Image (tube, grey):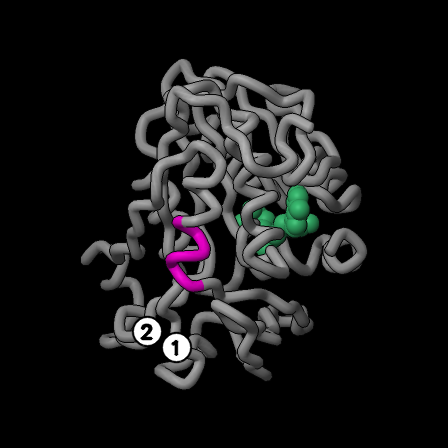
Amino acid sequence: MNARYDAVGDAYRQFKTTAAIPVPERRLFHDLLGDVSGLRVLDLATGYGLYARLALAQGAAEVVGVDISAEMVRGARRATAGDEIAFHTADARDLPELRDFDVVTAVWLFNYAQSPDDLADMAAGAAGALRPGGRLVAITVHPAYDAAGPDWIRYGLVVHDVAPVPRGQRLDVSLSTPTQDIPLTVFRWDADVYAEAMTRNGLDAPTWRVPHIPAEEAARWEPNYWDAAVANPLIAGFSCVRGAADPGGAKARS
Ligand SMILES: C[S@@+](CC[C@H](N)C(=O)[O-])C[C@H]1O[C@@H](n2cnc3c(N)ncnc32)[C@H](O)[C@@H]1O
């Protein structure tokens, strides 16, 4: 995974600024995160830091961004003016030194879990970094996304191959930019895989939400532009709260 994103670097940033997918994605993040005034936020799989910067813009008192790819972390530092966000290269499954955050965000992390156990290890990392009562906010591949349904090509994502795996699917996709396509492999996991991963680690079961495209935003596009996205949502977000009990079950505190 790290090697893949080490190679992607600036192309991914170009995708985020030219494709349509980030429009509903940013809106969903904004709505799920809400006002974080005065709170400490940890952004997992921060990439070039887009959502770390948005968390700061939504009032966070302190933001830390973490990514497994050293190249993405270098890009995050370049893209972020000043030093108000600390970026670290680290695996979200192993964050022993990051503790007691009020909110942990994870945009496009869990879809890289290669198995339900891997997803539970990521959930353990997130739960271990939260204070009791803290909140995980995530965006990932919608558990009910249908690769045979209305496609997302116009929004910048092409699905090339779909393979069943136990309790989910492996999707070989590419992200389209004006200059190149970025090939990626992601996983769509069933909703109960997420529920199990979260509850095993002291978080409550996810409350799922799909992006809402406000009328003023929709008006910027041709009529019916977002119909496929509404008919076959690929992006979904959830939030869940860490209970008072110590998270256990996986590697978070080993
Ligand atoms: C699609 S990018 C999303 C970046 C950012 N969240 C955004 O939406 O702009 C996925 C990121 O997840 C990172 N990643 C994948 N597995 C990870 C892991 N186990 N721990 C930390 N980062 C991971 C990749 O290096 C990559 O930067």
Q: Dividing the image into 4 quarters, which one contains the C terminus?
A: top right
Residue bounds of the magenta highlight: 190-195
Looking at the image, which residue is at 23% across and 63% down? Answer: 219
Q: Is residue 168 left or right of residue 134?
A: right
User: Where does the image place residue 183, in percent across and percent down from the top left?
Assistant: 67, 71
- Name the amino acid type tagged 1: Asp
| Earlier residue among tags 1 and 2 | 1
Q: In this view, does 184 lie to the left or right of 55?
A: right
Q: In the rendered image, is residue 14 in sight?
A: no
Q: Is residue 172 magenta?
A: no
Q: Does the magenta stretch include residue 193?
A: yes
Q: Mark 1 points at which residue?
A: 146
User: Where does the image place residue 103, in percent across and percent down from the top left?
Assistant: 44, 27
Q: How crowded is mark 1: few (under 14 residues within 10 Å), some or many (20 or more)?
A: some
Quadrant housing residue 102: top left
Quadrant housing residue 68: top right
Looking at the image, which residue is at 32% across and 26% down? Answer: 35
- Name the amino acid type tagged 2: Asn
Query: Which residue is outermost to the front?
Result: 249
User: Where does the image place residue 127, in percent across and percent down from the top left?
Assistant: 51, 31
Instruction: Determine if the C-beta at disc 1 is less than 8 A from ligand 1.
Output: no
Q: Dividing the image into 4 quarters, which one contains the N terminus?
A: bottom right
User: Where does the image place residue 170, in percent across and percent down from the top left?
Assistant: 57, 72
Instruction: Determine if the C-beta at disc 2 is less than 8 A from ligand 1.
Output: no
Q: Could you say which is closer to the camera, residue 146 or residue 96?
A: 96
Q: Is residue 183 left or right of residue 167?
A: right
Q: Name the residue under label 2.
A: 232
